[in-house]
């Protein structure tokens, strides 16, 4: 099985947990796209759900697939969020944001009664920290935040480069931050969140309830103990 087949299998398993009447948070990225496609099939087969999307591209895909979408600005809580990750470990700590949608993804994850991460086996790690950690920044604060995050021990680059930077769906910048050692991820998450101008970051430490990971065709599941 190749990675795409593993992504699809993980996505299909998660979408199998969506029940009639649910309000579902749709993630962003290639694995989430398989989930949206599968949900579209289930909707066309008669499942009645509504959804909110974590990015404009997921919104477009969901609408094209016939999924009834709501503006998240009108939504206070969702039932289930399904999203990908760049790294996930057995403690259900994850790094997200290679697609640049981590701010909306975290808000939707927090709104959800349950969040499932879906991934192929390449995303499973012993401990998160090798992937670049994306930080969303108000453009006004770019240099100031870059210096503050560098002071925390990261090599920082502006995604896309200074001349033509990547912009999030909110029009902000992403700093990709490479830490030699992440240290205590909870302490780092707090330190990042405390920097004025930081709008969000890709450390997901408490939001994820389950991970469904497919490696070489074998689906495994990690659940947070209740
Ligand atoms: C986007 C994300 C994605 O979920 C993450 O990057 C995984 O993407 P993919 O499924 O394409 O590997 O966090 O902001």
Image: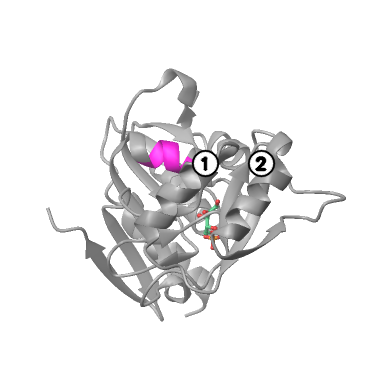
Q: Could you tell me how far apart the alpha carbons at marks 2 and 1 are, in whole angstroms?
A: 9 Å
Q: 209 left or right of 50?
A: left
Left or right: 168 in relation to 135: right
Mark 1 lies on residue: 103
Residue 75 in the image: above or below residue 66: above
> Quick check: 142 left or right of 63?
right
Residue 219 versus residue 61 in the image, above or below? below
Q: Nearer the viewer, residue 99 or 202?
A: 202
At a point 27% along the width and 34% down the height, the residue shown is 20
Identify the secondary structure beneath mark 1. helix
**Quarter-of-image position of residue 142:** top right
**Residue in the picture at 39% in, 48% down:** 82
Q: Is residue 189 magenta?
A: no
The extreme left residue here reads 226
Magenta span: helix, strand or loop, mainly?
helix
Stretch in magenta: 105-109
Which label sits on residue 168? 2
* Nearer-the-camera pick, 34 or 169: 169
Percent coordinates x, y for residue 128 in the rendering:
42, 69
Specify few, some or many for label 2: CA neighbours under 10 Å numbering under 14, 14-19, or 20 or more: some
Q: Count residues near mark 1 (Cα–Cα under 10 Å), then give few for <14, some for 14-19, many for 20+.
A: many
SS of the residue under disc 2: loop
- CB of residue at label 1: within 8 Å of ligand 1? no
- Please give the name of the residue rendered at 80% of the width and 56% of the height, measured from the top-left corner: 161
Is residue 83 visible to us here?
no
Residue 109 image-quadrant placement? top left
């Amino acid at each position: 099985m190749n990675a795409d087949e593993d992504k699809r299998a993980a996505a299909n398993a998660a979408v199998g947990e969506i029940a009639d009447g649910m309000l579902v948070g749709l993630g962003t990225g290639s694995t989430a796209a398989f989930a949206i496609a599968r949900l579209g099939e289930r909707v066309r087969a008669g499942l009645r759900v509504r959804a909110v999307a974590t990015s404009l591209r997921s919104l477009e895909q969901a609408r094209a697939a016939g999924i009834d979408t709501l503006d998240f600005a009108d939504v206070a809580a969702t039932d289930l969020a399904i999203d990908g990750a760049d790294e996930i470990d057995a403690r259900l700590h994850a790094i997200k944001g290679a697609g640049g949608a981590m701010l909306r993804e975290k808000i939707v994850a927090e709104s959800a009664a349950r969040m499932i991460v879906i991934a192929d086996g390449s995303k499973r790690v012993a401990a998160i920290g090798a992937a670049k950690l994306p930080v969303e920044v108000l453009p006004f604060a770019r240099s100031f935040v870059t210096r503050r995050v560098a002071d925390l021990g990261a090599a920082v680059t502006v995604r896309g480069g200074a001349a033509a930077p990547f912009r999030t769906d909110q029009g902000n910048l992403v700093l990709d931050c490479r830490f030699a050692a992440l240290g205590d991820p909870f302490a780092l998450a707090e330190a990042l969140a405390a920097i004025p101008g930081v709008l969000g970051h890709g450390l997901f430490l408490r939001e994820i309830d389950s991970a469904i990971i497919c490696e070489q065709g074998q689906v495994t599941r990690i659940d947070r103990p209740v």
